[in-house]
Amino acid sequence: MHAQFLRCLLAAFISASLLLSASSPSHAKRAEPRKETAATEDLMREHGILCRILLVYRQSAARLRQNPASVDKDALIAAAALFRDFGEDYHERLEETHVFPVVRKLQGSAADYPLILVDQHQRGRIYTDAILAYAGKDKLTTDDAAALATILENMASMYQNHAAREDTIVFPAWKRALTARRYKEMGDLFERIEVKRFGLDGFEKAAAQIAAIENKLGYSDLAQFTAPVLSCVDP
Ligand SMILES: [Fe+2]
Ligand SMILES: [Fe+2]
């Protein structure tokens, strides 16, 4: 009788355990392993964030020329602060520490770029300082607005050219120069640096920040930028 009771107790325990494990999260569909971001994909998507900031700069410059009072200076400050934090203090440091030294030693025209690119990084910092200073003023005079518009346009022009050369000349040359193993190691290293600086999902956080800035300025709706229908399609 005692043995039968123990068997019943054991059976009840096993049934309860099975039920519990079936309903526990660990039995739920396992999360997919995190997909790795290759090193150049990482750098290029960071350019995507920076290019969205530059679009904000261009659109703000146009508004400054038309009606300075219509520009949201706080949003402009947030955009410049993001360019500094994510672009200058993070992305450009990766390039200067890990990409440019390799490319500089290569044979061919790609080796000529790092010197100019570093010069542009330094110039960009001065421009970001100026954007923050102008946008931080209580009131922009007409002259201030014109000067800030020019600064924003020059920054956008420089960095759009800069990023386009990096994407199509410098990063491909760097990737070709590395072994497959070294390239993979660089992707892992970039990920570790990003997590150390921003915590998990640093790119996603930056993407959310620029999206919030675009939203504040009324630039969220991508469709508004679709080019108008041409009245004549056969020039
Ligand atoms: Fe750069
Ligand atoms: Fe870059």
Image: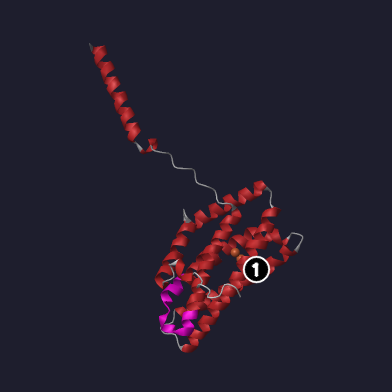
Q: Is the C-beta of the residue carrying label 1 under 8 Å from the nearest atom of ligand 1?
A: yes
Above or below, 88 against 190 in this view is below
Res 121 seen here: no
Q: x%, y% of residue 160?
A: 59, 70
Residues 41 and 222: in front is: 222
The residue located at (55%, 51%) in the rendering is 37
Residue 76 is one of the magenta-drawn residues: yes
| Type of amino acid under label 1 | Leu
Q: Which residues are magenta?
A: 62-78
Q: Position of residue 89 (x, y in %)?
A: 54, 65
Horizontal relation, residue 223 to residue 172: left or right: left
From the viewer's side, name the closer residue of 96 and 28: 28
Taking 104 as reference, is 221 left or right?
A: left
The residue sitting at 55% across, 59% down in the picture is 45
x, y percent for residue 110: 71, 63
Which quadrant of the rendered structure holds the N terminus?
A: top left
The residue beneath circle 1 is 117
Residue found 41% across the figure and 68% down from its top: 215
